[in-house]
Image: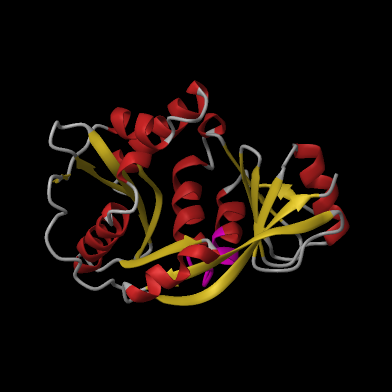
Amino acid sequence: MIARVTTPADRDRFARALQGALCLEPQLGAALDLFWENPGGGWQFYTSGEGGALALQGPLATALGPFDGEELDSFLTFLGAETLLTPGPPPPGWEEGETLTAFRGTPRDPGPCPEGFRLVEDPSLGELSRLVMGENTREEQENFYVQACIRKNHGKGTFRTLADSDGALAAGLGATTHSGWAYLAQGYVLPRYRGHGLGSWLIATLARELAARGEIPCLLCRPERKNLYRRMGMKGKMEYYLYKKKE
């Protein structure tokens, strides 16, 4: 039976289900630590009687470990989930939409900062939120901003940006650290600056910085970016599947 995480024992059960799940362990583990007792944080956490863990943030659900497929389908439908990320097969009524590869490892030295740009080591999270979430709703921008602030204030979030010659943000990236891992995500490069290596330079630079602190860098990528991360020296280790609810 799927049940909401409401006690420390539930929290520990959820955390155990995350162990060994590359990328998802730091991402969901940090969110669990920060938000499981905070209904206003935008996260929901559940466990299954079979030992699985289920997290929801908005329309995205993430499931790890064993679940009864029909129960999971009914539960996700009830909660209004539109997509499901999991390493296993889909529950009934869901179909594969995309495969994501989990990479880990320290990238090679990317060299000096791209000409005409400078690294901002303590960026305004408000400006970063507008950069990364500029095409989203104001509510989504504000949620990004609040959660970024909480992560940073609790020592679980590190953020870096690149500014152009006028001081305007051109690219941004965040990392969530938890249990010796550094999960890199929420990267964005303004369209007019794409194709010049800003994103890969920023990823490699932040990953190497975090690795020097003892955190193991990891990230999820779409198929078209796998060769890029291999060239950077990272290793693809496992795959996750992003399923969509059948209409």
In screen coordinates, is 84 left or right of 122?
right
Percent across and percent down for residue 160 are 24, 46
Q: Residue at the spot x=65%, y=67% of the render?
A: 87
Q: Is residue 202 above or below residue 65?
A: above
Report the quarter where the N terminus lies: bottom right
Percent across and percent down for residue 21 are 54, 68
Report the quarter where the C terminus lies: top right
Q: Is residue 92 above or below residue 56?
A: below
The magenta segment: 15-23
Percent across and percent down for residue 175 are 34, 52
Q: Is residue 170 above or below residue 201?
A: above
Residue 41 lies in the magenta stretch: no
Q: Residue at the spot x=46%, y=64% of the render?
A: 225
The residue closer to the viewer here, 2 or 68, is 68
Q: Residue at the spot x=47%, y=54% of the render?
A: 27
In screen coordinates, is 118 left or right of 181?
left
**Residue 190 appears anywhere in the view:** no
The residue closer to the viewer here, 189 or 55, is 189
Residue 17 lies in the magenta stretch: yes
